[in-house]
Image (cartoon, rainbow, N blue to C red):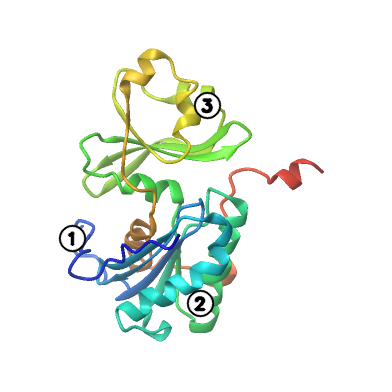
Amino acid sequence: MLYDALMTASQANRRPESRGNEPPGPKRLLAVDTTTGCGSAALIEDGRVRAEIGVDSFGTHSARLPASIDVLLKSLHWTPADLDGYAVTPGPGSFTGIRIGLSLIQAFAFASGKPIAPVSSLRALAWKLRGDGLPAVCPLHDAKKGEVYAALYLCEKAKMKALVPEGAYAPEAFLKRLPRGRKILFIGGGFPILEAAMSGAEKKRAVLSPRTRFIAPEVGLLGAEIIAAGKGIGPDDLEPLYLRRSQAEEGR
């Protein structure tokens, strides 16, 4: 399903907090996330989300994503030539989905010569919840085989600090790394897998966010900061963040 909630300038004005005298970021940026079944794309201008769209059918990302981007660009009367850079999630997530997103953004960058900002899908998911009342945020993706892609971040204002590094974890092993005695805000499709391994006390400390898992806007905002800091990369340097081997590789 192609979501009808296409947001334009008057509706979507999310902006990261100012950090002082930073160099100017890219004026216009395309952001894409295809790491899960909740694929999305967004357009950023001057640090604000101008438009976004979501596709909730993973199997059709490769077919629907280009059309979705075309819808976004036309909604603002932009063309691909108006873009100053790109942001994309190299992972972790579905290996097939990751390849779809990276290939698309690489094609844009090869044609334009504009920089790319790789943004972790877990970091973008956690960034969505900054300021939601609980500083400890745990983003989760289903990693299959009973595992989760997960991390734990301390989110305070415009800053994020990793308390537990990103990785592919068995639920029990990840739970042992979480701090005791504090509530944690969880988000993402991997939560049911982790919840099944939780004790009663752990479940009482867990707060599940109802927010949507479409994260292209956050990918774009974080990506704009990366490019503004001079850390954008070229298409030849863009690599997937798998965090573990694929099933095909494990079977060799």
Give the number of the mark in front: 1 or 2.
2
The answer for how far apart the CA atoms under marks 2 and 3 are is 38 Å
The residue closer to the viewer here, 119 or 95, is: 95
* Sequence-earlier tag: 1 or 2: 1
Task: From the image, tell me which residue sits under label 3.
Answer: 171
- Amino acid type, label 1: Gly
- Amino acid type, label 2: Phe
| Residue at 44% across, 56% down | 119
- Return the mark for residue 108: 2
Circle 2 — which element?
Answer: helix
The answer for how far apart the CA atoms under marks 3 and 1 are is 40 Å
* Sequence-earlier tag: 2 or 3: 2
The answer for how far apart the CA atoms under marks 1 and 2 are is 31 Å
> Pointer 1: residues within 10 angstroms few (<14), some, or many (20+)?
few
* Label pair 3/1, CB-CB below 8 angstroms: no
Can residue 238 be seen here? The reply is no
